[in-house]
Amino acid sequence: MKIFVTGCTGYIGSHTCVELLNAGYEVVGLDNFSNSKREVLDKIKEITNKEIKFYEGDMLDENILDKIMNDNNIDIVIDFAAFKAVGDSVEHPISYYINNVSSVLTLIKVMQKHNVKKLIFSSSATVYGKQEIMPITEDMPVGNTTNPYGTSKLFVEHILEDLCASDNEFKVIIFRYFNPVGAHKSGLIGENPNGIPANLMPFIAKVATKELECLNVFGNDYNTPDGTGVRDYIHIVDLAKAHLSGIQKLNEIKGGLLIYNLGTGHGYSVLEMINTFEKANNVKINYKIAPRRSGDIDVCFADSSKAQKELNWTATLDLEDMCKDAYNFVIKNK
Ligand code: NAD
Ligand code: UD1
């Protein structure tokens, strides 16, 4: 079976390609390297001993999508290609709407032309906005996104709902990822943000290696047990494996749209993250309490029982694995 993966050299795309290749799927990939490096292709090959059939190009370019569909008998598309930096999206909203929404419209148009009707789309827990009740289930209301990045994901979710309502043969899975962290055990692929990381785990890892001096803990007056923000961190390899379960599901159903949270169901605070990272890697994390980051919420963690029940998928790696693998990756890629 041939799987077309957009954004295949990015953080989640690369780990998913490894799992797909290991499971015996043929993988066709597209990336424009706007947030990744070509060398990731070699790393994927080194890990799996197999190769992706790779196309360099932009998902906004209908011609390259058309060529990919013509050259390959694609069964399923997994769409990871998007911009994802929250702060950047506030400064450049139109780029985000073009890259994250228009590109999906182009993709769907080409899929329809070639009668490819199975899609897995990468959405985010950010579509839930601020919820009063935890854990978050898929039927809780979405909306009230606080930035253009989140809104771009919400728009695509609505587009996919309308698509499935208009064509009962279309099969779509929307995965709402919580906080993916960590790296492949090999340390060959992982999260490699340009510049200073905006997210917690890559920042902690760079403080551990002394590339960064001190972690700012954004607020210790939240409504949580230790006052720092609580999130549902999930190991990237567990997250990648969920896509295998998604493929199986798409092959079973007749049509329609399914939505699944991907998290562990456990929330950890920033201070718990720091403590676990220190113990797991025997390092010291220099940190100080800083003001809250604008737009942050107190607590966010998933109820992932729907994915467990319907996809037979569950996260198996714990916070210690996430911390060890994140550190291993930064050490090997300094
Ligand atoms: P990433 O930036 O590492 O990977 C995205 C990849 O897509 C990059 O390799 C980039 O070069 C490529 N890309 C971007 N726009 C493109 C375009 N127009 N044409 C071709 N290639 C393009 O991001 P990621 O963390 O791997 O995220 C993958 C998906 O998951 C994104 O849609 C993101 O919004 C979503 N998501 C990520 C997280 C997270 O924490 N990482 C959480 C929730 C949702
Ligand atoms: C962020 C994005 C969210 C995206 C998610 C995916 C923002 C506002 N939100 O969520 O849209 O879907 O990543 O991974 O960027 N923290 C610190 N110091 C730091 C960095 C973070 O204390 O230097 C704290 C934050 O306040 C938060 C926790 O660590 O409590 C996690 O932050 P982060 O990794 O940025 O993820 P989210 O805020 O959950």
Image (cartoon, rainbow, N blue to C red):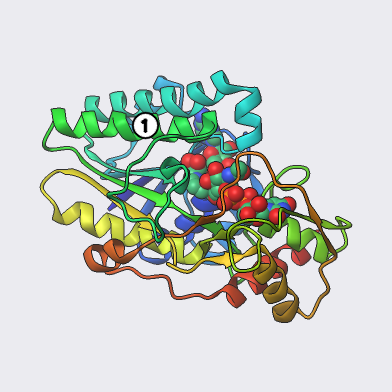
Residue 332: percent from left, percent from top: 75, 65
Residue 174: percent from left, percent from top: 33, 46
Please name whichever residue, 310 or 229, is drawn nearer the observer in this view of the structure: 229
Which image quadrant for residue 188? bottom right
Which image quadrant for residue 84? top right
Q: Quadrant of the C terminus?
A: bottom right
Residue 281: percent from left, percent from top: 74, 78
Label 1: few (<14), some (14–19) or many (≥20) C-alpha neighbours in 10 Å: many
Q: Is mark 1 within 8 Å of ligand 1?
A: no
Residue 233 falls left or right of residue 242 = right
Residue 38 shows in this picture? yes
Residue 5 shows in this picture? no
Please name whichever residue, 71 or 15, is drawn nearer the observer in this view of the structure: 15
What residue appears at the point 60 percent right and 68 percent down from the top-left corner? Answer: 225
What residue appears at the point 67 percent right and 59 percent down from the top-left corner? Answer: 201
Residue 291 falls left or right of residue 35 = right
What residue appears at the point 66 percent right and 49 percent down from the top-left corner? Answer: 39
**Residue type at numbered disc 1:** Val
Residue 224 falls left or right of residue 55 = right
Residue 221: percent from left, percent from top: 68, 56
Q: Which residue is mark 1?
A: 156
Please name whichever residue, 291 or 52, is drawn nearer the observer in this view of the structure: 291
* Tally of numbered tags: 1
Please tell me whether residue 186 is drawn above or below residue 94 in the rendered image. below
Please tell me whether residue 255 is drawn above or below residue 186 in the rendered image. above
Secondary structure under the numbered disc 1 in the rendered image: helix
Please tell me whether residue 37 is drawn above or below residue 105 in the rendered image. below
